[in-house]
Amino acid sequence: MYMDSVVVAGIVTVLLILGFFGGVGAFVVYDIKRRKPKAGKNDSHAPAKPA
């Protein structure tokens, strides 16, 4: 198969996009695991009790 420079540039672009979104996804998963509330701690996102 003939590999034109445009074909190579397209393949590289697709690989860079996939790598970028894979990195963002890995960061989100890591951040969710890091921010998971520990047992016995108050949830900071719980609604405040009315006065």
Image (tube, rainbow, N blue to C red):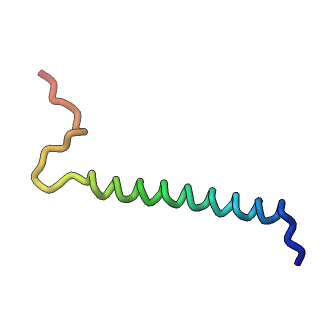
**What residue is at 63 percent from the left and 56 percent from the top?**
17
Q: Is residue 45 above or below residue 17?
A: above
Left/right of residue 26 with respect to residue 35 in the rendered view:
right
Percent coordinates x, y for residue 13 in the rendering:
70, 58
The percent coordinates of residue 29 (x first, y second) are 39, 58
Point out the image quarter for the C terminus.
Answer: top left
- In the rendered image, the quadrant that contains the N terminus is bottom right
- Outermost bottom residue: 1
In the foreground, 20 or 51 = 20
- Residue 36 quadrant: bottom left
| Image vertical order of residue 2 relative to residue 48, above or below | below
The residue positioned 23% from the left and 33% from the top of the image is 47
x then y, percent, for residue 37: 21, 52
Residue ID at (18%, 30%): 48
Q: Is residue 47 left or right of residue 21?
A: left
User: Which residue sits furthest right?
Assistant: 2
How far across and how far down the image is residue 27, in percent? 41, 56
